[in-house]
Image (cartoon, coloured by chain):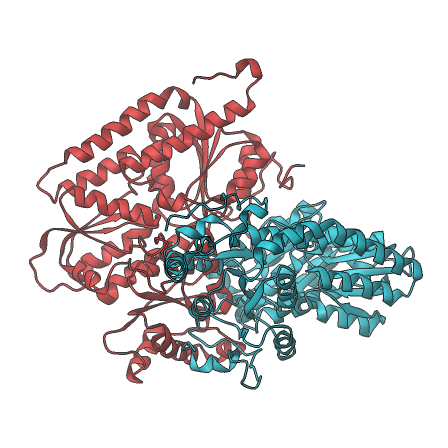
Amino acid sequence: MTLLRHTQGGEITERQALTINPAKTCQPIGAMYAALGIHRCLPHSHGSQGCCSYHRSTLSRHYKEPVMAATSSFTEGSSVFGGQSNLLQAIENIFTIYQPDVIAVHTTCLSETIGDDIPQIAEKASEKGLIPEGKRVIHASTPSYVGAAPTGFANMTAGMVKYFSQSTSPNKVAGRVNVIPGWVEPADMREIKRIVAAMGLESIVFPDTSDVLDCPQTGVHEMFPKGGVTVEQLRAAGDSAATIALGPVCSGPAAVELTNKCGVPHATLPLPIGLEATDRFILELRKHNGGIVPQEITDERGRLIDLITDMHQYFYNKTAALWGDPDQLVSLSELLLTVDILPKYVVTGTPGKKFLRQMGDVLQDRKSEVQVRQGTGADLFLMHQWIKNEKVDLLIGNTYGKYISRDEGIPLVRHGFPILDRVGHQFFPTVGYRGAIRLLEQILEALMQLQDVECSEERFELTM
Amino acid sequence: MISVLEQRASQIHQDGNSPFAMDCEKHSVAGSVSQRACVFCGSRVVLYPVADALHLIHGPVGCAAYTWDIRGALSSGPQLHRMSFSTDLREKDVIYGGEPKLYQALVQLIDHYRPKAAFVYSTCIVGVIGDDVAAICRRVEAEKGLSVLPVHSEGFKGTKKDGYQAACTALFQLVGTGATDDISPLSLNILGDFNIAGETWLIRNYYERMGIQVVATITGDGRVDDIRRAHGAALNVVQCSGSMTHLARMMEDKYGIPSLRVSYFGLEDMSRALYEVADHFGDGQVQQRAEELVRDEVAAILPDLRRYKKVLSGKRAAIYTGGAFKAFSLVRSLRTLGMKTVLAGSQTGNREDYRLLRELCDEDTILVDDTNPLELAKFVQEKEVDLLIGGVKERPIAYKLGIGFCDHNHERKIGLAGFEGLRQFAREVHSTVMSPVWRLVPRRRRQLAASQANSLSTENLRPSCAGECSACDLPHCNIPAGQEILL
């Protein structure tokens, strides 16, 4: 029995009013994830109870960690009279019982539409003495009908700058860079910090979910684990020598905000997934450390190239289908082309102007062989239809691709968010040279495993 | 006692000596890290298993994305319910209204899939921008000639329970529209089982073995045409009372169908369900078949249960469920396994539920309504539990505390209903409570070290097997007798 036999190939009808099996989700979850990357911060969902519950569940399923967030628990009354009293009560309760340093409020479709003004409510909370000395309430506007999860991440990250970063002197701190890592795994954030340190630079990475969503087992449930960027660091980000934004969608707005507010120059790079993208990151870091690349990093790069040469013959003529967030897709596509795999189909539900241009830059002379779709109608149903019409060898994306994988017998390399059906992914970075090694190992494993399972007995061989 | 949110104090019953006066059915306190969800969530989980219907979510994409195939409600036929359909409202739709999009999406989907009926779920935003969803449904229904049912599930309009009610209201529009001529007087509908891991199939099989015709399963492995003729059944058997009582009541009022409230979890409750159904019909043959069935099924699982009980006796459990009714069965089932329930709570229980729970549990069992992770973690530690039973948000908390976990909610892959379900429940509990991995957990290690200091007997060195390992042949109990565990 074919699962999802409800999808057929053939002629593809345009859909303007309908999304089937989305390749995106709404803004607030991105804001919640970003806010978890602030030390001792409780994300707060200003809307109905369900939003908060869904976001927490989805984040929990992916990271296999408790995810703490509060909600304004809107009622029928709040939808008529506004959510001010809910938020005031929430702020009071949260600081009384959970005692975070920061409450990071994000809005929802409901609270945006009824027009709640969060800064004004926070001001009122402050006047009423509901915000204890030294504690802060910050916010990001994240209506669910605008953007998608990555833009929610971007808005909350920009909010961190708006609320906290300060320029205390025209002389910036040499040798200290801000890195905005984008929506990547806690392990990726950890790896980015390692790389920057290996380059001999001091870094302020924000948000930083390492040691928040990849905590060691200690036998204790910490409401606020030890990780996360501190308010002090966020403040100091305004004095750093430069900001490197990794991924224009997720990290660009915060970097621009830092430039405008504090005069910290920024460079926006693609996510450092794959050889070339990591090269760009290293080259950018080199501008701040006197031009040195330590042997450690050079060796990592060398090992990656060594691996690629070992693998290249198995990748020849292979094709892949990719879906997920724009920042991820651009870098993944580049990595695939580097190793001679064609990213034949690329789909993201997340809107944003830069994506198609960036994809064009990456694809260059192979544009005509690739289908890229973004925004309305760009969903996994469309992807499945494309694949029904012409198959690929490999799927790369989140768990939602498993239906296509099963239906078409195409191996799936799980990447991106969410991964709901595997454990362990949260510990392995895919950024940097070492991350690329991990990713390529997974890709080849998927292809070879399929060959070993499907080939005829006489073709079954011990060696590659 | 631990500190709790002041406004929540009355929703917790901690002390066996104090008079029992628990508050519940309250709206969650704003700012609470509640484990609850919304109206839409309630409607979505109840209706979703109707497998040959179209489920279109009218709103921004999130509500559809988060509920895409999250509940393992199996279907023996169509899989249409496992797709995610959304009108994906954008800013301009919010300004100008989402009705044109809804109409277009419905028409496109109905033309393409030819479903038996369509459910259209309203989300928060729809309630605020004022789309007339019912009018669009009527229009499409007239044009396409199939039932298009609005589900009034705007998230802010109450709790998950109100979502159940909205779902029942939608279902009730289907009931009474099908032919009932071939329905036996010995017939029933199964209400409130969602076929998680195939449970509806098992229960249906029991009734059929008793000689009773099952007309409709609502909604596990549900079909529109069965629901249409559900009014022809002689009895509604209602499980998960929270979600389906409303439908049963409406069917009783309009069609005079009586209903029985049952639970399929645990030996006592499962047997009682079958006996009560048999007694309801008062048919000697059905009663005799029920007795035989219970005897055979119990005999088949008893040896295993005895083995598990031997190892699990004295272990302590905490239960946090969605509905309270499930908690009753769990307390009984744990007792069958020799385990003690030291904490019990639910997201949506009512006063009567908690009174029953109070009676069922021990004097010192803590009862909580609509708890939050902080409370849960503190109680669980304070009571030194070995097992937490809960849903997706509770699992990582249990593991962080270093205690076993059993999912009794959407995500479980093992049927826990019926007699076979109890055996599987015992196996699940055993697999996690007795797992050797807890020996690695620092808190447990400290406890073990403390108990080792008190007594040097080998028993205390065995956190998992209480010295009985050699007596049992279960997967995790393979520690040779006398072997010490490295602390």
Task: Identify the hue of chain B.
Answer: cyan
Q: Examine the rendering and report whether any part of residue A239 can be seen.
A: yes
Relative horizontal placement of residue A192, taking residue B364 as reference (left or right): left
Q: Nearer the viewer, residue A441 or B64?
A: A441
Relative horizontal placement of residue B428, taking residue A245 as reference (left or right): right
Q: Nearer the viewer, residue B471 or A317?
A: B471
Q: Examine the rendering and report whether any part of residue B70 can be seen.
A: no
Relative horizontal placement of residue A161, taking residue A444 as reference (left or right): left
Q: Quadrant of residue B330?
A: bottom right
Q: How many labels were placed on the picture?
A: 0
Chain painted in red in the figure: A
Position of the C terminus of chain A by quadrant: top left
- Which residue is at a point 49% across and 71% down the rendered structure image? B371
Q: Residue furthest left?
A: A171
- Which residue is at a point 51% across and 45% down the rendered structure image? A400
Coordinates of residue B454 in the picture (x, y in percent):
39, 62
Position of the N terminus of chain A by quadrant: top right
- Location of residue B441 with respect to A402 vertically, above or below: below
- Location of residue B481 with respect to B222 vertically, above or below: above
Q: Nearer the viewer, residue B470 or B342?
A: B470
Q: Residue furthest top?
A: A458
Coordinates of residue B52 in the picture (x, y in percent):
71, 50
- Location of residue B470 with respect to B119 vertically, above or below: above
- Which residue is at a point 79% across and 65% down the rendered structure image? B236
Coordinates of residue B299 in the picture (x, y in percent):
76, 51
Q: Quadrant of residue B55?
A: bottom right
- Which residue is at a point 49% across and 44% down the rendered structure image? B479
Coordinates of residue B128 in the picture (x, y in percent):
53, 71
Q: Quadrant of residue B453?
A: bottom left
